[in-house]
């Protein structure tokens, strides 16, 4: 049901939404020590979007395929919009500890993984290429979660 291009476009939109929220949080948090962390998180989201863009297939498509893909992208765009899962309702102005910020980021990444796993159910089993791309995206999100967990465990987040 979902093409590789649609999955990647969705991943890019999620990353851009997360980046936008982290960059906006830079301006509203009372703890200046968090600014570096918000910047790091925003940069990570930006890097993810670029990485996902590089995964997009470049094969030529027929006019019908392009039209169907555009229609699917439009529907997904309307569904997703500016959603960024758990970050949408976060009150960054009340966060004053790096630990709290990283815990929120972990929650966001987990929600993202759950969303991608839901999409997984809508991909035809025969479409191994789309499944492989989606699994790479999920692996990257899980790597992000582990990075944040490692930071928490290292004590580096105890500000």
Image (cartoon, grey):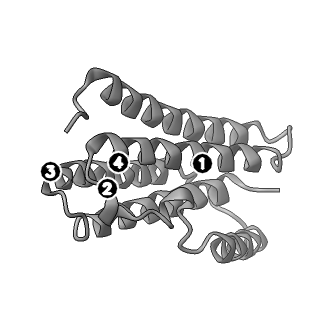
| Lower sequence index among marks 3 and 1 | 3
The x and y percentages for residue 14 are 52, 59
Looking at this rendering, what residue extends furthest in the right direction? 125
The x and y percentages for residue 127 are 79, 42
Could you tell me which secondary element the residue under label 2 belongs to?
loop
| Lower sequence index among marks 4 and 2 | 2
User: Which residue bears the numbered disc 4?
Assistant: 101
Q: Residue at x 38, y 65 (%)?
A: 21
User: Which residue bears the numbered disc 1?
Assistant: 111
Looking at the rendered image, the disc whose residue lies closer to the viewer, 4 or 1, is 4
As measured in the structure, the alpha-carbon distance from the residue carrying label 3 to the one carrying label 2 is: 11 Å
Q: Are marks 3 and 1 in contact (CB under 8 Å)?
A: no
Pick the residue in front: 11 or 59: 11
- Asked which quadrant contains residue 136, the reply is top right
| Lower sequence index among marks 3 and 4 | 3
Q: Are marks 4 and 2 in contact (CB under 8 Å)?
A: yes
Residue 95: image tag: 2
Q: Residue at x 86, y 38 (%)?
A: 125
Residue 40: image tag: none
Could you tell me which secondary element the residue under label 1 belongs to?
helix
| Lower sequence index among marks 4 and 1 | 4
Q: Residue at x 77, y 71 (%)?
A: 68
Q: Are marks 3 and 2 in contact (CB under 8 Å)?
A: no
As measured in the structure, the alpha-carbon distance from the residue carrying label 3 to the one carrying label 4 is: 11 Å
- Asked which quadrant contains residue 99, the reply is top left
The x and y percentages for residue 94 are 33, 61
Looking at the rendered image, the disc whose residue lies closer to the viewer, 1 or 2, is 2
| Lower sequence index among marks 1 and 2 | 2
- Asked which quadrant contains residue 35, the reply is bottom left
Pick the residue in front: 110 or 128: 110
Q: How many marks?
A: 4
């Amino acid at each position: 049901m979902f093409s590789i291009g649609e999955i990647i476009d969705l991943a890019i939109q999620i990353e851009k939404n997360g980046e936008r929220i982290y960059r906006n949080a830079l301006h509203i948090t009372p703890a200046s020590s968090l600014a570096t962390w918000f910047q790091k998180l925003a940069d990570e989201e930006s890097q993810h979007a670029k990485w996902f863009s590089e995964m997009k297939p470049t094969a030529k498509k027929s006019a019908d395929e392009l039209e169907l893909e555009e229609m699917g992208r439009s529907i997904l765009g309307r569904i997703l919009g500016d959603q960024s899962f758990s970050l949408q309702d976060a009150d960054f102005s009340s966060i004053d500890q790096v630990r709290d910020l990283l815990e929120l980021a972990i929650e966001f990444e987990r929600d993202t993984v759950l969303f991608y796993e839901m999409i997984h159910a809508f991909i035809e089993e025969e479409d191994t290429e789309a499944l492989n791309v989606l699994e790479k995206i999920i692996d990257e999100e899980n790597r992000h979660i582990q990075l944040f967990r490692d930071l928490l465990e290292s004590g580096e987040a105890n500000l």
